[in-house]
Amino acid sequence: QVQLVESGGGLVQPGGSLRLSCAASGGTIFSIYGMGWYRQAPGKQRELVAFISEAGGTKYVASVKGRFTISRDNAKNTVYLQMNNLTPEDTAVYYCNADIVHFGGRHDYWGQGTQVTVSS
């Protein structure tokens, strides 16, 4: 059974940094296409924060450009989100997402979510 497991969330002061990781595991994974990070703050809709294609092309929501960096390690089936200069507005539950081709077919998967809280 393929699953995405996230790590790296926590409490950080404004101006601080965190690095989120999300690893795909389980089953027989043949390839992973696009991978992304979403976030959902209380009372708000889930939004796409950053996306990285299989070839490494990236895109970001305007509010995080220049502060967040998405990357991936295809050998480890892992996507990362380096978050710098965090502000209270970045507080949310962060979810990773991946388009995975595995023995059972091609499906879209979500991580369980990791809380990021930016507060002094």
Image: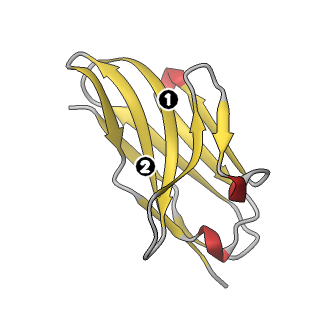
Quadrant position of residue 93: bottom left
Q: Is residue 86 above or below residue 32?
A: below
Is there any visible trace of residue 118 in the rendered image? yes
Q: Earlier in the sequence, mark 2 or mark 1?
A: 2
Q: Residue at x 49, y 58 (%)?
A: 39
Label 2, residues with CA under 10 Å away: few <14, some 14-19, many ≥20: many
- Residue 19 vertical placement versus 36 (above, below): below
Residue 51, image x, y percentages: 57, 39
**Image point (36%, 26%), residue name:** 100
Q: Is residue 48 above or below residue 73?
A: below
User: Can the viewer see residue 116?
Assistant: no
Whole-percent x, y for residue 46 in the image: 45, 59
Horizontal relation, residue 59 to residue 38: left or right: right
Number of numbered discs on residues: 2
Residue 42: give x, y in percent of width and height. Answer: 44, 75
Which callout, 2 or 1, points to the residue nearer the camera?
A: 1
User: Are the residues tagged 2 and 1 within 8 Å (C-beta)?
Assistant: no
* Residue drawn at x 43%, y 76% as measured from the top left: 43
Q: Quadrant of residue 87?
A: bottom right
Residue at which label 1 appears: 34
Residue 50 percent across, percent down from the top left: 60, 45
Residue holding disc 2: 6
